[in-house]
Amino acid sequence: MSWESRPSPIASLTPFFSFGSFAFKQGSDRSVEIGLASKLQLGGALDLISSFSIGEQPINFGLDDQKDLIGLVKVELGMNATLNAANRFFLRYEQSRYSDRVATVSDFGMSAARAESWMMGIETQLPEADLTIGLRNDYALSHGTVSLMTPGRMLKDGTILYDHKSYGLGRSVNLRPVLAVQHDIYGGTLNFGADFGSWDRTDLEGIELSFSRQF
């Protein structure tokens, strides 16, 4: 649910609230997010976009299918720049910070964990279609530490003593090409997209083809 307001001709503010089907029930499957999005138009050729939200998200931290709720703070930043009548440049960056959790004998723990992703590219209007090409770095954990409890030794009475181990989180930049085409046909829209492995090893991982029509 969202509500857009325009405090000035060049700016808009949009408070939003989203929730999953189990949001108002007890348990670890509910997800809730509340935040504020904004858009600032500069000179008609540049749009600055931002969003800030907080919430809870169910995540599986263990070896079974059980999920636990964890707090989440998310920030999104972006821009759309009109280069000319047929070309537009876009940039998006997203960062999420997770609340700390203590490791147990069956679940992982996290401390100061942070995940990031970004995407940039060019949208071009062709005579018969819209073409998007660009690069993205997929959403993944990038900072903080992850911890776990590992069996250390066993006492004579059968009691198991566990060792607490921590590992730093990090990631390397893995650029993935982005390719998408949108074509209006038969009163609807034909969409084509391709997924590649990385920029230096462009294995084709998947192809998407869809058609949509509004009645």
Image (cartoon, rainbow, N blue to C red):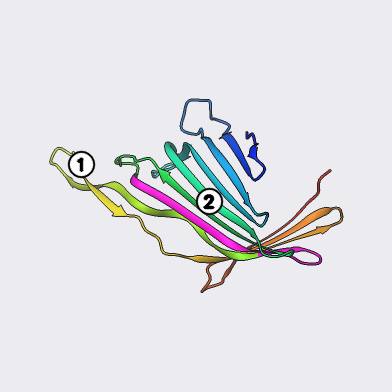
Residue range in magenta is 110-132
The x, y position of residue 100, in whole percent, is 34, 41
**Residue occupying the point 40% across, 60% down:** 171
Looking at the image, the residue that sits furthest to the left is 156
- Please state, as top left, top right, bottom left or bottom right, where the N terminus lies in the image: top right
Q: Is residue 148 left or right of residue 129?
A: left
97 vs 52, nearest the viewer: 52
Task: From the image, tell me which residue sits under label 2.
Answer: 77
Distance Cα–Cα, label 2 vs label 1: 48 Å
105 vs 209, nearest the viewer: 209
Q: For residue 160, which numbered disc appears in the image? A: 1
142 falls in the magenta region: no
Q: Residues within 10 Å of mark 1 (few under 14, many from 20)?
A: few
Amino acid found under the numbered disc labelled 2: Leu
Using the rendered image of the protein, determine whether residue 178 is visible from the camera's viewpoint. Answer: no
The x, y position of residue 179, in whole percent, is 65, 65
**Marks 2 and 1, the one that precedes in the sequence:** 2
- Please state, as top left, top right, bottom left or bottom right, where the C terminus lies in the image: top right
